[in-house]
Amino acid sequence: MVFAGHTVKVFHRGQTKADLPTTVTYLQGNRQDIHQYQSQIEAFAPDVILDMIPYTAADAQTVLNTITGTCSRIVAISSQDVYRARDVIWGLETDIVDSTPLTESSPLRSQLYPYQNAPQRPLGVPSNYDKILVERTYLNAADMAVTLLRLPMVYGPGDPLHRFYAYLHRMDSKRPVIVLDARLAQWQSSYGYVENIDWGIALAVMQNPESESTTSHRIYNLSELHPLSEKERLNLLAQSANWPGQILAAMPDQLPPDRLIPFNFQQDWTTDSSLIRQELGYQEPVSITTALERTLHWERQNPPTDIQNSASAMVLLDPEIEDRVVAAFSH
């Protein structure tokens, strides 16, 4: 955005460093206390606010209380976990499978707070996390133009979930075979490489809300154009990692019962990103091949302290069990 001639100010906690242009200025503090910086925000007089981490309705309302009267346009980051398909996968909705790819008008979850009772919450989100309530809060704000971006699973350098590391570790350990549950192998889900997602966010921020192709409220899915199955993505990872091994899809009855993944894999989790492509001209600047190469390079340089912290670890068998499954196939 800076290179497009815009003036940017970043409000952040100061816990991480980013390589940003020298013209970017900063406010440092916690978002819960953003109202304390209202005078500085008014002095900056932003045309648009980008809210990157609204986890709760209170997060969104605090921002609105701070900027109302100062700024009349906001872009907020949401998630594809707002869709009912998420709860179908988790078994919280039964006797239904939603059509995919999901569009911006696909059914949303009927149950709120998706991680309230989860034993572990991703990225330490609070128990009252819910992007549905974030969206409602922003969309119901008076005299505020709102753009919501529903993001997929985001991977690439800096990924705190190390989504592909467990796969990469098996490949770099020269395991000859990686066994996947056959249901997972054919399951499709939407991803986005971090630089491509960044570009989509930038386009949404820089769009002209007065143009004919936009209205005061817009919701966009932001994801890859062509979703892949887990096996297809793993094959691309193997090519990028120069791994010559085999990916074996095993039927559930060929796997230990206690290692079956308790998800409904009849429900894919793919989103249709055609709207943001049509209205904002979004196209990925980084190809999937380059994206995976950059991701694997970063993962090798920045392995997680515990391999179980990799999001892909949960779908892999222990090596000893995997060897027994592979041996059974050879008989």
Image (cartoon, rainbow, N blue to C red):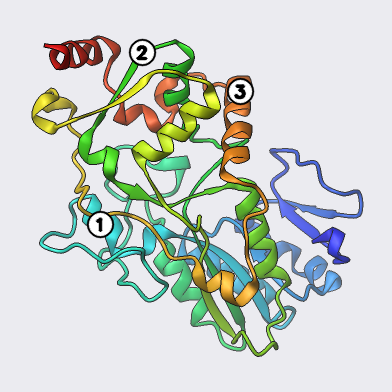
Give the image location of residue 3, x and y in percent.
Answer: 86, 59
The image shows residue 292, relative to residue 175, as above or below, that is below
- Spatial CA distance of label 2 from label 3 is 24 Å
Name the one closer to the observer, 142 or 83. Answer: 83
**For the point 50% across and 28% down, which residue is it?**
239
Q: Which residue is mark 1?
A: 87
Q: Which residue is mark 2?
A: 176
Give the image location of residue 64, x and y in percent.
Answer: 61, 74
What's the amino acid at mark 2? Pro
Q: Earlier in the sequence, mark 1 or mark 3?
A: 1
Name the one closer to the observer, 263 or 213. Answer: 213
For the question of whether residue 118 can be seen, the reply is yes
**For the point 62% across and 35% down, which residue is it?**
157
What's the amino acid at mark 1? Asp
For the question of whether residue 65 can be seen, the reply is no
Secondary-structure class at tag 2: loop
Q: Going by the picture, which residue comes out furthest to the right?
A: 23
What's the amino acid at mark 3? Asn
**For the point 21% across and 40% down, which residue is it?**
183
Disc nearest the viewer among 2 and 3:
2
- Spatial CA distance of label 1 from label 3 is 32 Å
Give the image location of residue 81, x and y in percent.
Answer: 38, 57
